[in-house]
Image (cartoon, rainbow, N blue to C red):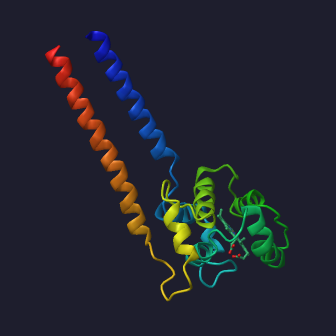
């Protein structure tokens, strides 16, 4: 009996740990990425009227390009390289080089967690995989013919969905723990 309880509890531990890692590994939300972008000082140049595109312009452009390129490096060569070269006089030939350069312009290190947040959020937009486990809807959306409302899912809705998933997972875990506690008390 004791052994069974022990096994049950360790199983719960495993479930808890995997849920936690799932949450950690999930893509940053747009709100998180946007505030990181502001904290980093990218908005010195990237704002309306600045020499770079504003956050909103970048995000809507990347949303529109979701799934268009096989790789992020390909995207950089096709759509960013020329622009950066003519405006800043530097050559960026890959996705990582782009963020390394941009981090330097803001006086930050390329491995600054905020840079990573912005980088992975924008990458998830381009790859059309913004929500973990929601790979099918974006593909369907991007293959739809051009309609007046290109943005079907708003960030708030996306956020709502992932919160719901996490909340549900938490509920299941709590229920399991309560059951285990009952079992322990009986034994
Ligand atoms: C010195 C001004 C300057 C700073 C500071 C700067 N950028 Fe840029 N950035 C530019 C310019 C100019 C371009 C090329 C024009 C454009 O695409 O917006 C560019 C391009 C980009 C692009 C490609 C944009 C696109 O439309 O595809 C990204 C992504 C980017 N920057 C991210 C950042 C991030 C993240 C930071 C902060 C860590 C940052 N930038 C800081 C000037 C700057």
Return the x and y of residue 179 as percentages of the image width and height.
Answer: 21, 29
Residue 78 in which image quadrant: bottom right
Q: Residue furthest top?
A: 2
Q: Nearer the viewer, residue 146 or 90?
A: 146
Residue 43 seen from this side: yes
Residue 98 seen from this side: no
Say whether residue 133 is left or right of residue 97: left
Residue 130, above or below 61: above
Q: Residue at x 56, y 83 (%)?
A: 145
Residue 81, above or below 14: below
Which image quarter is the N terminus in? Answer: top left
Return the x and y of residue 68 as percentages of the image width and height.
Answer: 68, 71
Say whether residue 22 is left or right of residue 103: left
Q: Quadrant of ligand 1?
A: bottom right
Q: Nearer the viewer, residue 170 or 120?
A: 170
Say whether residue 29 is left or right of residue 163: right
Q: Residue at x 77, y 62 (%)?
A: 73
């Amino acid at each position: 009996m004791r052994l069974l309880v022990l096994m049950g509890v360790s199983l719960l531990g495993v479930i808890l740990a995997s849920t936690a890692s799932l949450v950690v590994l999930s893509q940053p939300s747009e709100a998180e990425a946007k505030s990181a972008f502001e904290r980093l000082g990218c908005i010195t140049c990237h704002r309306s009227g600045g020499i770079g595109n504003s956050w909103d312009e970048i995000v809507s452009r990347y949303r529109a390009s979701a799934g268009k390129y096989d790789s992020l490096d390909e995207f950089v060569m096709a759509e960013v390289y020329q622009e950066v070269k003519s405006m800043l006089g530097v050559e960026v030939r890959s996705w990582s080089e782009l963020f390394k350069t941009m981090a330097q312009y803001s006086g930050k290190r390329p491995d600054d967690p905020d840079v990573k947040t912005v980088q992975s959020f924008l990458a998830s937009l381009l790859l059309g995989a913004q929500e973990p486990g929601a790979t099918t809807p974006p593909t369907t959306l991007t293959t739809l013919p051009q309609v007046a409302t290109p943005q079907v899912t708003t960030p708030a809705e996306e956020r709502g969905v992932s919160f719901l998933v996490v909340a549900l997972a938490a509920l299941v875990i709590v229920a399991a723990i309560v059951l285990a506690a009952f079992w322990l008390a009986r034994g």
